[in-house]
Image (cartoon, helix red, strand yellow):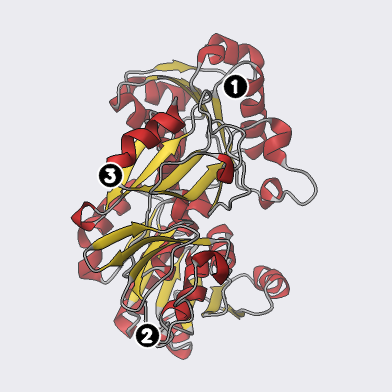
Amino acid sequence: MKVIIVGAGEVGKYLAEVLSQRDQDVTVLERDAELASELEQELDIRVLRQSGSSADALVRAGVESSDFFLAMTSDDETNLIASSLAKALGANQTFARIHDQTFRDASLINYQRHFGIDHLLNPERLAAVEMAKSIRNPGRVAVEDFGRGMIEVQAISIHKRAKVLGRPLAELKLSGKMRVGLVQRGSETIVANAGTVLEVGDTVTLFGAPEAIYEVLPLFDPVAERRQNVNVVILGGGEIGVSLVQLLSHTRFNLRIIEQSRAVCERLADAYPKINVIHGEGTSLRLLEEEQIGQADFFVACTRDDEDNIMTCLQASKLGTPHTLLSISRPDYIEILERLGGTLGIERAVSPRIATAQEVLRYVGKKSFTELVRLPEDSGVIVEIRVGKDSPCVNKKLREVKWPKECLVVGLEHRYEVRTPGAEDTIRAGDWLLVLVKPGLLDELVALTTR
């Protein structure tokens, strides 16, 4: 596998190290002589001291035969230009690291489509997604490797007063963002379809967007306790903090942001009038006590200062906050927190650098078929499958494909967009499918989709 990386900063260097350890053919373009020299000394890879936004340099790097092109500098414009040029010159898949919200806003123009880039990656957004998964889904089972937490799995028993009883699933008009997958009825396991009728005592497995599943739970069990009014305090109104606000926009989350910049506070208050914005120094123990941080359910420290994030999480934990999370940049801090986090009372530390690298590694060297979860008693298996260009599924709607009898597509990823698909969704070559299938039909499914 031939991989070209532009930029030898934190993210680029980390990716180069991981990929070279996996015996990939790695070439790095870095115009800073000092960074390039350090990389040459530390890793057994090819390093070119040239600009990644130069077409001539990309040709010299062999971009036309590259499987993956990763533009990972700290400059958005450089990454967009480099990835666009690489795609035009023949790179198979291109990734551009971006930070500016402007380039993720597709209301006026879709920058990803305009520049012909396969994937736009925002490190801070990816870190926020990891944190949001911990906040939205404590104690739940989630398919973490599909859709960056956008597809969740949850089992629930059908109550005797459930509104879903006695009617085929097709008549229930459930949210299009979720699916009923497996139905466990005594010793029998059923892969649900449109005609499945639920009975009292059935255990159903739901797939879909986390908030969509949360909304439909009362239909299956009207007396089940649903946690309302989850109190979340976010320290830092930067990119991670704003992304968290967007990801936790459901009314069940009461959000507060502590930010020391008055100008940032004013922008946040204008943009998100439903959240409580507090102007103050988050490292002040007095402020944390005044804001009764100990009574919050979650405290998330995501400023740009690692030390401030660590210290405020320690203070919040000491004050009584049961769940503390933080963002971290320095690699040596991450290692220490992984060893001592439980002792210190810090539940999770997330690195934007590592989150970005892990997202890239989901694709680089990834097999066309991966078994994610095998359900208890071999009742079913959840697999992730890449649709091959010669598959008969290509350019067909979901309802037009002759799927194996006990098989259900519960997730679809197309060009970085992840959703629970409907019958009218069209499958394209290169799409990734999340599929629930009976183990005995797995070979038939793989043969149908991957050829």
Q: Quick check: can you spot residue 411?
A: yes
Disc 2 element? loop
Residue 260: % across, % down: 57, 72
Separation (CA) of disc 3 from disc 2: 31 Å
**Amino acid tagged 1:** Ser
Residue type of the residue flagged with mark 2: Lys
The residue beneath circle 3 is 439
Q: Residue at x 44, y 42 (%)?
A: 359
**Does label 2 or label 1 sit earlier along the sequence?**
1
- Assign the N terminus to one quadrant of the image: top left
Residue at horizontal 40 percent and vertical 33 percent from the top: 15
The percent coordinates of residue 450 (x first, y second) are 43, 29
Q: Residue at x 54, y 78 (%)?
A: 255
Whether residue 14 appears in this view of the structure is no
Near-viewer residue (401 or 37) = 401
Left or right, residue 338 beside residue 123? left
Amino acid type for the residue under numbered disc 3:
Pro
Judging depth in this view, the residue of 193 and 353 nearest the camera is: 193
Pick the residue in front: 260 or 88. Answer: 88
Quickly name the residue at label 1.
51
* For the residues bearing labels 2 and 1, Cβ distance under 8 angstroms: no
Tag count: 3
Q: Circle 2 is placed at which residue position?
A: 160
